[in-house]
Image: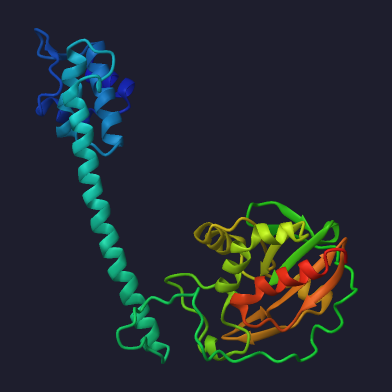
Amino acid sequence: MRIGELARRAGVTTKAVRYYESLGLLAPVRLANGYRDYDEHDVRLTQEIRALCRLGIPVEATRPFLECLALGHRHGDDCPAALAGYRDAIDELTQRIEGLTARRAVLVAHLHEAAHRNGGFSPAEGEEPMTDYTSLPADLPVPEDDGAAAHLRGARMPQLELLATDNATISLEALGGRTVLYIYPLTGRPGTDLPEGWDSIPGARGCTAETCGFRDHHQELLAAGATRVYGLSSQDSDYQREVTERLRLPFQVLSDPTRSLAQALDLPTFTTDGLTLYKRLTLIIKNNVIEHVFYPVFPPDKHADQVLAWLSDNADG
């Protein structure tokens, strides 16, 4: 067959075929008229080269695989030399990953250093520039009860459907049993700055720590009578999904970017840095009715313990 047909059948360009020949990987027969004549074996070799290149193995390193096929083996990696080729490719890839990981760590460190510097606050001497959102400063301001949640107990959940991090749509009016719904402003993410002055806003800091508390006590909450646990914020589901995966949460988080639940139940919110966010509170919902409200919530990293204690004291409630 001619070079064009070989290239078409193998899924490569004629230029690539000529390059393989220049390396001695293909050796077609020369006809009397000077044309190259390729056979089925050349098609198989070219397909093997293409497949290996797609795995990241350089063309020049495919020779052991082609020689294995030339020896009559069914697969190009049936020979010890081919297995060694895999190992070499893996070692090279590992070195590249390690190099990229080191570069990424340096970039993240520079990002956090610049963000802290430009935000008007810097890490203390000897402190890592990376923010640890699971640890809370000792001097966080305590939120006061402004009465903004006093009307919620006894209210029925509205006819709203919100998207969860598993892509399921959750109907809030159809929550049976006893549901723990903790509502928070926003969770931080490594490499993403929190709003300026976040730590100085009463009740703002601590969403990740609070979420980790519900994660760590999840089975105990269920054993104490909770049918399910949900988190809820106004962040979009893609953002929440990263948090859910990174923190390995055993429950779903609901996304309410338009704050539709706040409008339906007149929930308390606050505005900072151009964002309108939920104030932190937790609803205990029993058969579609709000049975109990935690507001304000403080400290957030101990809140799951507070909810667990209430459930235990109200097992028959």
Point 29% across, 59% down: residue: 101
Compared across the picture, whether 185 is left or right of 173 comes to: left
> Residue 103, position in %: x, y?
26, 64
For the image shown, how many numbered marks are present on the structure?
Answer: 0
Residue at the spot 65% in from the left edge and 79% down from the top edge: 277
Quadrant showing the C terminus: bottom right
Asked if one can make out residue 184 in the rendered structure from this viewpoint, the answer is no
Say above or below: 62 vs 268.
above
The coloring applied to the image is rainbow
Q: Nearer the viewer, residue 120 or 223?
A: 223
Residue 18: give x, y in percent of width and height. Answer: 16, 27
Instruction: Classify 7 as above or below 37.
Output: below
Tell me which corner region of the image, top left, top right, bottom left or bottom right, holds residue 306.
bottom right
Residue appearing at x 73%, y 54% in the figure? 169
Res. 85 visible in picture: yes
Q: Residue furthest top?
A: 32
Query: In the rendering, at what x and y percent does residue 129 appear?
Result: 35, 79
What residue is shown at x 33% (from left), y 27% (from top)? Answer: 11
Using residue 107 as the reference point, say whether residue 207 is left or right of it.
right
- Quadrant of residue 200 within the rendered picture: bottom right
Q: Quadrant of residue 120?
A: bottom left
Task: Pick out the residue farthest to the front.
Answer: 313
Q: Is 228 rendered above or below residue 193?
A: above
Residue 173 in the figure: left or right of residue 144: right
**Residue 251 x/y as whole percent:** 65, 57
In the rendered view of the protein, which quadrant contains the N terminus? Answer: top left
Asked whether 49 or 201 is in front, the reply is: 201
